[in-house]
Image: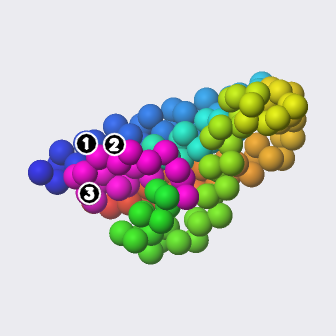
Amino acid sequence: MKEDLKGEALRWLTQAEEEFKDASFLKKSGRYYLSLFLCPQSAEKALKAFIYLKEEEPIFSHSVASLLKLATSIDADFKPLKDAKRLDDYYIPTRYPNGLPGEIPSRYYDDPEEVERALASCKKILELVRRKIAGE
């Protein structure tokens, strides 16, 4: 049974890593709003990879903050990553003009440093999850 959980965890981690690569590429291309959107997507999938490694139940949350709380309740090594909950701020407004009244996401998100911070938060989650899965 444990091998099945590890296989599922690896599927989720692989997708998370691909989305992180895409987010990094989009930042280099100046597509900041799309890069910011993919950061919480990648972090979410990485956290789900870890949780699936430990739990058999499906997870329906899309919130990085909620998933971090759950991961931390399973393993305290996730506690230092609590600031990554800020990635939730990019879930809606990077995609929908009504998420930023009076603004357009593709023009509003124009700060490469903001993207770099989001990528760094996401990368920390990916690295920790990778280590946790490898240690199983």
Question: Mark 3 or mark 1, which has the lower sequence index?
Answer: 1
- Identify the residue under disc 1: 7
Q: Is residue 123 magenta?
A: no
- Identify the residue under disc 2: 10
Compared to residue 92, the image places residue 83 above or below, namely: below
Amino acid at dot 2 = Leu
Q: Real-space Cα distance between discs 2 and 3?
A: 14 Å
* Camera-side residue of 2 and 94: 94
Compared to residue 4, the image places residue 19 above or below, namely: above
Say which quadrant the C terminus sits in: bottom left
Q: Real-space Cα distance between discs 3 and 1?
A: 13 Å
Rendered image: mark on residue 55: 3
Q: Real-space Cα distance between discs 1 and 2?
A: 5 Å
* Camera-side residue of 94 and 110: 94
Q: Is residue 92 left or right of residue 18?
A: right
Question: Mark 2 or mark 3, which has the lower sequence index?
Answer: 2
Q: Position of residue 30 (x, y in %)?
A: 81, 27
**Quadrant of the rendered structure where residue 53 is?**
bottom left
* Camera-side residue of 100 and 25: 100
